[in-house]
Image: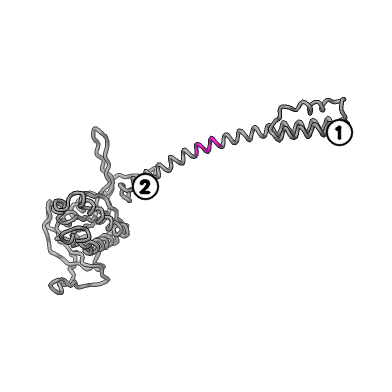
Amino acid sequence: MSDFNLLLDVLIRATMKVSRGCYDDASELFELTQTGRYPDAITQLAEAFGMMMVQVEAREMHLSELIQTLESKNQQLEAHLQRIRLLEKIQVDLGHFVPSAVRRLVATNPEGVSLDKEERDVSVLFLDVVGYTRLCESLGKDKMNSLIESLFSTLVDDIVQNDGDINETAGDSLMVIFQNPEPVQHACNASRAALAMQRKVEKLEPEAVGLPAPLEVRIGINSGPVLLGTSRFDGLTGSRWTYTASGSTTNIAARIAALSPGNCVLCGPDTARRVQPRFCLQSIGIQPLKNVAEPVEIFRVCAESAGEKREEGPQGPQRPQGQARS
């Protein structure tokens, strides 16, 4: 067999071994690299093929290492993704309990968020169910709880659509905070949400929800400065944080709601001054409020209107809308 045919046979066998990933058995090829025994062209070709085998083996080893590294990184990435999904789920779950104002603050500046109390001008709305205790006794706690959940679920959209933030719930009551850079706007938003909720409650069929009589709610609104932010309570077992609006504006809003006879939206003079003439108001006079030093003029929010509007009641036309005192 000629040298070139021998080389060709050796190269074919070596190529087949390389294709199977076998790089160690290259004795025949190295035999052909001996100078002086074979022509220079054969030894050079054998050496070049041998170097190619070495390079292919090195690259395959490097590629195998890269694949292992990628698999390890992929496992780490999957672990991080699982943690992110868990954190996102926790964020969604906590979002049901954290006021949207706090969520916006954290989302805007997660590293430097400040929840310290600061003075803000807001409108505060309180809503509660008339005769809640009596209804609990007649319907039972479970049925009444389902009724309250269903009722409040229908009212949430009216609150959110008017930029309100449910701050607290307690049994049959809601505390809602309305914020806006324009004081007139948040007062109007609160009044609009209140009227929308009142209409929904009035449309409820008592038989459909298992009530012996129509359901009624009390709604009170007050506008003005509050301290808005977190309150921290430290105890032996840990700390408790709450985010709320505190001050006389909030206290008076709660007292105003307590004055409502049911399915009636009442507001204080500061709210009334801001919403006129966008809303039709009716003064119900100067009223004493519990734990408030001076009596306060209270207004009924009758309807939203571009101008003055008379209200038709059971006794016929009532007097024109009252003007909030300056």
> Is residue 278 placed above or below 166 in the rendered structure?
below
The CA distance from mark 2 to mark 1 is: 75 Å
> Is residue 55 placed above or below 298 in the rendered structure?
above
Q: Which of marks 2 and 1 is nearer the N terminus?
A: 1
Mark identifier at residue 4: 1
- In the rendered image, residue 319, in percent from the top left (x then y), is placed at 15, 72
Circle 2 residues within 10 Å: few <14, some 14–19, many ≥20: few
Instruction: Count how many numbered circles sit on residues in the image.
Output: 2
Q: In the rendered structure, which amino acid carries the disc numbered 1?
A: Phe
Magenta residues, start to end: 71-77
Tell which of 223 and 2 is nearer to you: 2
Quarter of the image with the C terminus is bottom left
* Residue 115 on the magenta segment: no
Q: Is mark 1 on a helix, strand or loop?
A: helix
Tell which of 150 and 279 is nearer to you: 150
Circle 1 residues within 10 Å: few <14, some 14–19, many ≥20: few
- In the rendered image, residue 272, in percent from the top left (x then y), is placed at 21, 63
Judging by the rendered image, the residue that carries numbered circle 2 is 92
Cβ atoms at labels 2 and 1 below 8 Å apart: no
In the figure, residue 15 lies in which quadrant?
top right
Q: Furthest-front residue in view?
A: 1
